[in-house]
Amino acid sequence: MAGTTIPASRGRFRGSTALRDNLAGWLFVAPVVIILGLFMLLPILMALWVSLTDWNGQGSPFRSGVPFVGTGNYTRLFTEDGLARQDFMTSIRNNIYYVAIVVPAQTVLALGLAVIVNSRMLKGKTFFRAAFFFPSVTSSVAISVVFLFIFANSGAVTSLLGVFGIDGPDWFSDSRGTLHLLLGAVGLVDPSAPPAALTGGGPFGLSWWEWLSGPSVAMTTIIMLVVWTTSGTFMLMFLAALQDIPVTLEEASMLDGAGRWQRFRYVTLPMLKPTLFLVLTLGLISTWQVFDQIYVMSQGNPSKTTLTPAFLSYQTAFRSFEYGSGTAISFVLFSIIVVMTLVQRWVMRERDGGSRRRRPAHASGRASARTGRS
Amino acid sequence: MATVKSAGKGPGGGSAAARSLVSVFTGYCILIFFALVFLYPFVIQIGNSLKTEPDAAANPLSPFPDPFSTGGYEKAFLNTDLPLWLGNSLLVTVIVTLGRVLLDSMAGYALARLRFRGRRALFSAIIAVMAVPGVVLFIPKFLVLNQLGLYDSYTALILPVIVDAAGVFIMKQFFESIPVSVEEAARIDGAGVFRTFWSVVLPMARPALITLTIISFQGTWNEFPHTLVAVQSPELFTLPRGLADLVTGSLGKGTQYPLKLGAALMATIPVAVIFVVFQRYFVRGANEGADKG
């Protein structure tokens, strides 16, 4: 081992390592690259083509005989008055109400449960955490079967409501919009004879009255099911974030005399902001994809009030054999979700930039300033 | 801590103790209420699956069967294809899980450690793939399977899901967190890349491998929409597909709730057992899912 030979042999070693790493690297990633390419990238390109055709499922979509319709499948969803647009806009309306209720509900429930489970005064943390999380690991199909039973006409929820003297609705066959029912209950409008101003017209082929329906009673059962299954996962995320909050910070604010609500509002909540945004945006992305529960529980019924774009695209392609139209719906849904994802990325970047470093000092400063005054 | 508090508060200490007792009590009440909300549906499911049909219809809320009956299970196992669905689900889940654990960790290792050309671009591509919502791939996946002549086969159930981008991501993160010195020693001793990976790196990666195994098993066992676009023959149905067919399709004559709830329980039990045994890995999986966002 003379000193002069070491650099030379090292150099050769490094050169061969580079070659070996290149070869080995690509061999190691090859299965993943091939399968993701074949079943993620290629399908998207194929589907882009199919969405420009009227392929009916017979033979290959790339034969010369398949009618090419250009952007017809897309414009039909937005500008042409007809059943396709009406169904699509109905599904968009249903999903908007679904998102508007599920996302806040699951976030608040998850946060509340996490804060209580995390409380140092209470024991049995592991058990409660497991109990709340368990529904989210089980099969969505199996759980939907259970909820079909629970909300059945003679089911558990109806009998439970009966105990309190409430006559529950026929959950899955009730297509009445809850906002319509609410407006009727406060006496603003009569749902059986809505004002002509609202039924006369509206954007995208649905009347204002139809846009303002709210989720149907049937949809609320699916909303309850989904909030029930997803809250557990988000609770875990909040719990992990809560456990990262330094104990000293809470104790300091406690000694400062901050009440429980003040502590939550001015110490805990600012520390949870990144997680809160993450949970909200993950929620926004996933709620636009609701499918399994719709398939098992309602198939879009009653009166299309549980139809969602995801289910509609499946139905259009595989039940009506209008693959072009179904694929076009998928791509519109894709762009909705991409927009949600970009919003998420953008918001998270804002959060990560300035506030992470200065937040703890800032938060405790605010807490003590506040409590100093009181 | 209690002494610090009462010392600080002085005369108010007594009422503070009473207040905290009240808040402990309220806290438990809320926790127990929600534990019931989250777990009672499963109790109802088990109870009613062991009832007769009229009993399930008349007393859906009660967890106690009266009379006790295994009729639902007998019908589920003898009159439906439940045994076949269970077999298919087990086969697909085991193969996909093994495949994911091996292929995802190989790719994760390469991305973390091997300096090959195009590594960064590939990693960005995998991140992009993770962001593609599964729901918009239904029809596209069917198109590819159809074009390749794989539609309606076991290959169609298994091959498209045998790798997943999120698993690659989890493994890459893990490999980056362990020290590189042991591998370097092995490689200087002349072990090849694969030897090093297989006998030095993988044994060190046990916790990550268990997490990946568990989330792959759970995800594949529960997978439903992929089976809708991959197969149509009843002989190829997995349990979730069979269940969905049982509830929505021609088989769903009458209500037959004990049967349906019992069959659904068969889908829940394996995941429940794994959940109870490996709970902390589930928790880790959920939080690693959060980190990728």
Image (cartoon, coloured by chain):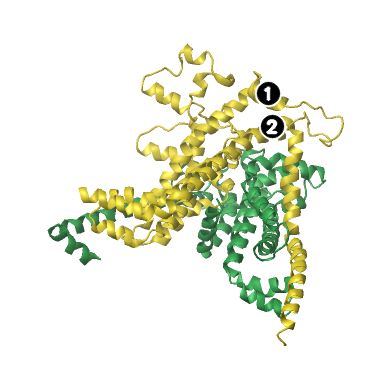
Q: Is residue A61 above or below residue A77?
A: below
Task: Give A346 or B243, whichever is nearer the viewer.
Answer: A346
Residue drawn 31% across the image and 60% down it: A121
Extreme-right residue of the structure: A64
Do labels 1 and 2 touch, CB within 8 Å?
yes
Q: Circle 1 sits on which residue? A: A76
Between A230 and B103, which is closer to the camera in this rendering?
Answer: B103
Question: Pointer 2: what residue?
Answer: A328
Q: Is residue A209 left or right of residue A62?
A: left
Residue A188 in the image: state x and y as whole percent. Answer: 38, 19
Residue B114 is situated, as x and y percent measured from the top left of the image, at 69, 65
Camera-side residue of A319 and B256 = A319
Under tag 2, what secondary structure? helix
Query: Residue placed at 75% from the left, 58% from the top?
Result: A30
Whether residue A284 can be seen here: yes
Q: Position of residue B76 (x, y in %)?
A: 63, 50
Q: Residue at x 52, y 40 (%)?
A: A284
Whether discs 1 and 2 lie on one chain: the answer is yes
- The chain letter under disc 2 is A
Q: Quadrant of the N terminus of chain B?
A: bottom left
Chain in green colour? B
Q: Which chain is yellow?
A: A
**Residue B65 visible to the viewer:** no
Q: Amino acid at mark 1?
A: Arg
Q: Residue furthest left?
A: B11
